[in-house]
Image (tube, rainbow, N blue to C red):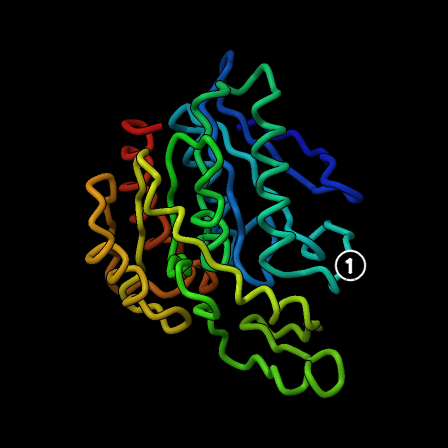
Amino acid sequence: MLEQRLFIPCEDHDIPMVIAYPQGDGPFPCMLLLHGFMSYKEGDGYLFTKTAEKLAEAGIASARIDFCSMGENRYSRIHYGTEICIKEAKAAFEYLQTREDIIHDRIGILGHSMGGRITFLSSELPSKCLVTFNGAVNVDKPGALTLKGLNAHDIERQGYTVYLTSDGRSELLFPKFVEDLQIHSDAIYQYTNPILVCVGADDPTLDPKVSYQFVETCGMENVDMVVIEKANHTFNAKTKDFTKVYELLDKVVPWLQEHL
């Protein structure tokens, strides 16, 4: 696998991107990878690093980015929320469409956790397919993304709060993040290309019922689901045991080879 590291423009700031390529000559189909809440482009527990490797082995390129104020993205945390993430995903997707080494009409979007929410909220982009890994896919309801430990009262009282992440970091959150929880859309129900919803059955962070209910009630014939038993929110990636990650990817990659 070959990787190119670059920065692409988005309004008044730049987005860090890593494009991973298969061996051989392109152009290649490509998946845009959107990380989760308070994570970065490698994904929680290097989930997206492993994903990029498996995609490359299958002849699929991938591009992973850092959202606002995460990883190498230097845009201020005060902007962090759904709105800017949607804009950054759009900028990244449109950049990939300009590249000669990417097949312009074979670009899909894959999001983990909050990145899955951004994936569904980006359904009006001309993507070839959408994939979520334990995604917050209940995008048709305002305020439907809930986070354990988020103190909205602190934000209202003092203008910020300190959020303790699952990997032990202390991070600031500002009013924009809470305000953007009201952003919602039912555009996903008009999406006609293939959708794959992937669920870790033992996810303690985002209730698997969120994904199950979407699949059961959406009434869409273009939706498939993969369930990985005994897998948590990162498909156990943070434990450094990638058994469940590879079990997931062994199902996702053939699906993408068929639908991307």
In x, y percent, where is residue 246? 34, 47
- The residue sitting at 30% across, 57% down in the picture is 199
Mark 1: which amino acid? Ser
- The residue sitting at 74% across, 63% down in the picture is 77
Q: Total number of numbered labels?
A: 1
In x, y percent, where is residue 88? 63, 44
Q: Is 228 drawn above or below residue 88 in the view shown?
A: below
Give the left or right position of residue 251, taking residue 18 as reference: left
Most distant residue in the top direction: 25
Q: Quadrant of the C terminus?
A: top left
In x, y percent, where is residue 198? 31, 52
- The residue sitting at 46% across, 28% down in the picture is 107
In x, y percent, where is residue 62? 51, 33
Give the left or right position of residue 173, taking residue 245 as reference: right
Give the left or right position of residue 188, taking residue 26 as reference: left
Q: Which one is in front, 137 or 25? A: 137
Q: Is 31 drawn above or below residue 98 in the view shown?
A: below
Q: Which one is in front, 257 or 142? A: 142
Q: Which residue is mark 1?
A: 76
Check disc 1 and report its element: helix, strand or loop: loop
Give the left or right position of residue 162, taking residue 60 as reference: right
The picture quadrant where one finds residue 220 is top left
Mark 1 nearby-residue class (10 Å; few <14, some 14–19, many ≥20): few
- The residue sitting at 47% across, 51% down in the picture is 47
